[in-house]
Amino acid sequence: MKNYFDKFPDSYVESSRRMIQTPSAFARSALYYVQETGYLKLKESHLAQRKNLDSYLVVLVLSGSGTLMYKGNSYSLQKGSCFFIDCMVPYYHQSSSSDPWELIWVHFNGSSSEKYYQYFSAKSAPAFHPQTFPELQDSLEHLLEVNTASDLSAEIFSSRLIVDILSLLLLDITERHTEKHPGHQKMSQIRQYLDEHYTEKFSLDALSEHFFISKYHLSREFRSLYGITLNHYVIARRITLAKKLLRFSDYTLEQIAENCGFYDSSYLNRQFKKSEGISASDFRKKWIN
């Protein structure tokens, strides 16, 4: 069967492959699912333009160059570029006339796609050069192969590969965000200190004095870099230790509270319920062997 590509002559295409899928009801409700995945190598320039498409799109530029226009901004794309966009927003991408590109991509949706995209877009421009490009290419090529079939096994495998692709994208932009943050070395030292002393009495004033940094600047920069406040970070570490002691020790709640830095069982229970939705005692009952 002929491969159809956006209403332009076959003479424009050097090589192409496209798989369009209709997800099952189960995939729509529970999985990440492929709407379309494909590969294209052009001989001439071509413009693709869409809007109001209920889909998320990841594209890798394998060779050549071109342009992405998205949310009023233009992004230059070359070999090694990637872009990740929400296709409800109007966009177009166009291959260079002098250096036509070679692409591999997936249109997908489902599960928590929107949440992944919101996290990504809060930290990164839509187009960038990921350090994980080879791994992304492998996953997309594998995804294309998997979707030669249309069955539940292919849908389950596709969902796993989409998670791999999204995880690679988010790890890449998170690491770049951390590296570019002007105070990341100081914040890393502070986080390491908290990891070693989180069961001790916590004071923002004492912490800022210890690291010779204003407490307001410390609070702002820590949250900016790690996406969590200092206080919530310390409490999360204490809750994790409390879970271990509740499950694998015979300590009383008072002893656990003291060991974790909560100092009394009522405060432990209050923070535990706020975090886990149940009291520390109920947690122990549910998880005890």
Image (tube, helix red, strand yellow):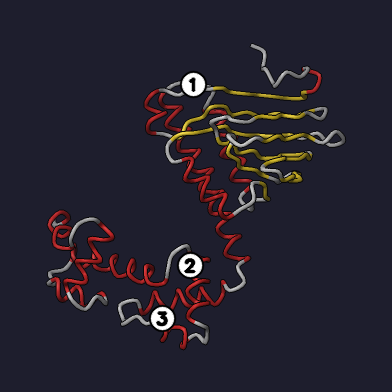
Residue under label 3: 204
Q: Is residue 8 above or below residue 102?
A: above
Q: For this view, does 78 lie left or right of residue 84?
A: right
Tell me the quarter of the picture where residue 256 sits. Answer: bottom left
Q: Residue at x 28, y 60 (%)?
A: 275
Which of the two residues, 116 or 50, is positioned nearer the viewer here? 50
Q: Is residue 46 above or below residue 72?
A: above
Disc 1 is placed on an element classified as loop
Q: Earlier along the polypeptide chain: callout 3 or callout 2? A: 3
Q: Earlier along the polypeptide chain: callout 3 or callout 1? A: 1
Tell me the quarter of the picture where residue 270 sits. Answer: bottom left
Mark 2 or 1, closer to the camera: 2
Callout 1 amino acid: Thr
Which of the two residues, 277 or 31, is positioned nearer the viewer here? 277
Disc 3 is placed on an element classified as helix
The location of residue 255, given as percent across then percent down, is 16, 76
